[in-house]
Amino acid sequence: MNRLTTSKGEYELARYPEHPRDPFRAWDAADEYLLRQLEGADGATPVELSGTVVVVGDRWGALSTVLAGHRPVQITDSYLAQRATLANLVRNGHDEDAVRLLSARDTPPDRIDVLLVRVPKSLALLEDQLHRLAPAVHAGTVVIGTGMVKEIHTSTLKLFERIIGPTRTSLAVKKARLIFCTPNPALARTPSPWPYRYELPGDVGAVSGRTVVNHAGIFCAERLDIGTRFFLNHLPERTGHDRVVDLGCGNGVVGTSAALANPGAAVTFVDESYQAVASAEATFRANVGADAGARFLVGDGTEGLVPGSVDLVLNNPPFHSHLATTDATARNMFHGARTALRQGGELWVVGNRHLGYHTQLRRIFGNCATVAGDPKFVVLRAVKR
């Protein structure tokens, strides 16, 4: 946990799930820069926050917590960001309802007077969010984006220009930058291109030639990534009434492949991204059937599953948290998978060879076998004894 100091006071903030050895803060220089701008620091005019304030993409709730007195609406695609926000609100003496939490799938407010956008890593997600928010923005809306310099590109500014209105940027401070956008309600906008659909190649097992549905912000939303492709060609061949979990499901292509290969399986799709779970459900329905049985859960790993209830967990864990490279998410997923699995249940993992997941799996499960590998990727299997 760390302490953020602003002109309004000090705030104790932490990421979620909180870990005492987590080296990363719950905010960065981009959040600080935006807060100083709102307060009128460095000669800027303070921003009037009496209307409807919407905070988009607040990564760990730092912005929402500092602005809680103005009862903002937070819009995020991340379940973990919502949990972090709630924890940080309580930690700093606010009621949980001081911030209205909406997901990226929810309908935004009808009118927005102040729009604050933490630029996401995914340009597609930004595009989709701006399309959703534009109808609620009026000529007097204050629109300010923020991000680290390496997150803001010409393409980022062009999106604001094309969807909201004329855009300019600030000088860089501590490698962070602000985006100022003047809304143009008369701007002619093309429809959002999301969700995006594509057909899978013919050499990826049970889902060969099938259609994938991707909402904005999903990893490799416009094509099949090579790690998943390798995994699809080395999934376990099983029959019967297996209880299968696609953990960190993304667009759901792995779980859908398991369902097609074994019609008796009951598949649960889990991700902390609302867009991912929506994509997984759309992909599953498009290929397995509108009435086929499956569960779709937005949550923190396996926390929504009954311990000891699962036969097989399939996992392609991320190794980035926003711009930071970390194995914390994978480690949490492996621990959660072990809890969810029954005795004799199996966790199958695909990952870049250099990440060394076999070491963690042996530590957590007491065993790990290599199923398949190439110079870049490896598929590993761990069994709960």
Image (cartoon, rainbow, N blue to C red):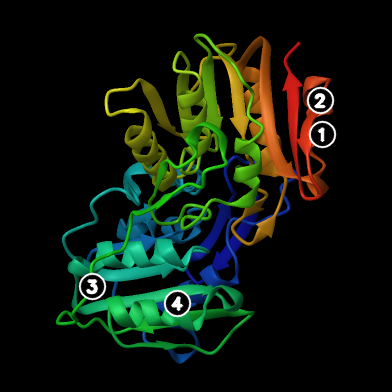
Please, what secondary structure does the residue beneath circle 3 have? loop
Q: Looking at numbered disc 1 in the image, what kind of residue is underneath it?
A: His
Residue contact between numbered discs 3 and 2, judged by CB atoms under 8 Å: no
Task: Tell me which residue sits at (72%, 15%) in the image.
Answer: 384
Real-space CA distance between mark 3 and mark 2, rounded to the nearest whole angstrom: 50 Å
* Label located before the other in sequence (1 or 3): 3
Real-space CA distance between mark 4 and mark 3, rounded to the nearest whole angstrom: 17 Å
Residue, disc 2: 368
Residue, disc 4: 156
Camera-nearest label, 1 or 4: 1
Q: Looking at numbered disc 4 in the image, what kind of residue is underneath it?
A: Thr
Task: Find the residue positioned furthest to the front.
Answer: 202
How would you rate the neighbour count of disc 2 (Cα within 10 Å): few for under 14, some for 14-19, many for 20 or more?
Answer: many
Q: Looking at numbered disc 2 in the image, what kind of residue is underneath it?
A: Cys
In the rendered structure, the answer to whether residue 58 lies left or right of residue 359 reads left
Up the image or down, 120 lies above or below 199; here it is below
Q: Quadrant of residue 362?
A: top right
Please, what secondary structure does the residue beneath circle 2 have? loop
* Label located before the other in sequence (3 or 2): 3
Residue contact between numbered discs 2 and 1, judged by CB atoms under 8 Å: yes
Identify the disc placed on residue 358.
1
Residue contact between numbered discs 4 and 3, judged by CB atoms under 8 Å: no
Identify the disc placed on residue 74.
none
Where is residue 214 drawn, in percent x and y? Answer: 40, 50
Residue contact between numbered discs 2 and 4, judged by CB atoms under 8 Å: no
